[in-house]
Amino acid sequence: MSTETNIQTVNCTAFKDQKPGTAGLRKKVAVIRQPHYLETYVQAVFNTLKLPAGSALVIGGDGRFFNPEAIQTIIQIAAANAIGKLIIGKDGLLSTPAASHLIR
């Protein structure tokens, strides 16, 4: 089975307030919905991690508003970065203990 993928390259710079804490990027939805805000942050994380092609990634959130949309964006950027496997919580939900279990 073959599917066509369109990859779009967008030049952008980091936003000055994109400083994650221990629980990730905690911002109001209005901030994250700014054009290219989430995409820039996620790509910066991938650039920092320098994961080899085919790596696995655990994705999930607490289910608050915008969680499903953010996860779809992360999936697309992960594919563009040759991530080989994504482990995503049901409906995007993943508690901290569940994520820790999957990582270890």
Image (cartoon, rainbow, N blue to C red):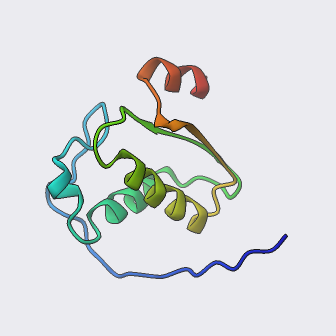
Q: Where is residue 19 in the image (x, y as percent from the top left)?
A: 22, 48
Q: Is residue 94 above or below residue 17?
A: above
Give the total number of marks visible in the rendering.
0
Q: Is residue 47 above or below residue 68?
A: below
The residue drawn where x is 63% and y is 56% is: 83
The residue drawn where x is 69% and y is 54% is: 84
Image quadrant in which the N terminus is located: bottom right
* Left or right for 22, reference 96: left
* Left or right for 65, reference 91: left
Outermost residue to the right: 1
Q: Is residue 84 above or below residue 67?
A: below
- Corner quadrant of residue 90: top right
Image quadrant in which the C terminus is located: top right
Front residue of 97 and 64: 64
Q: Is residue 62 above or below residue 69?
A: above
The residue drawn where x is 44% and y is 60% is: 73
Q: Position of residue 76 (x, y in %)?
A: 52, 64
The residue drawn where x is 36% and y is 45% is: 67
Q: Position of residue 43 (x, y in %)?
A: 42, 62
* Left or right for 34, reference 10: left
* Left or right for 4, reference 7: right
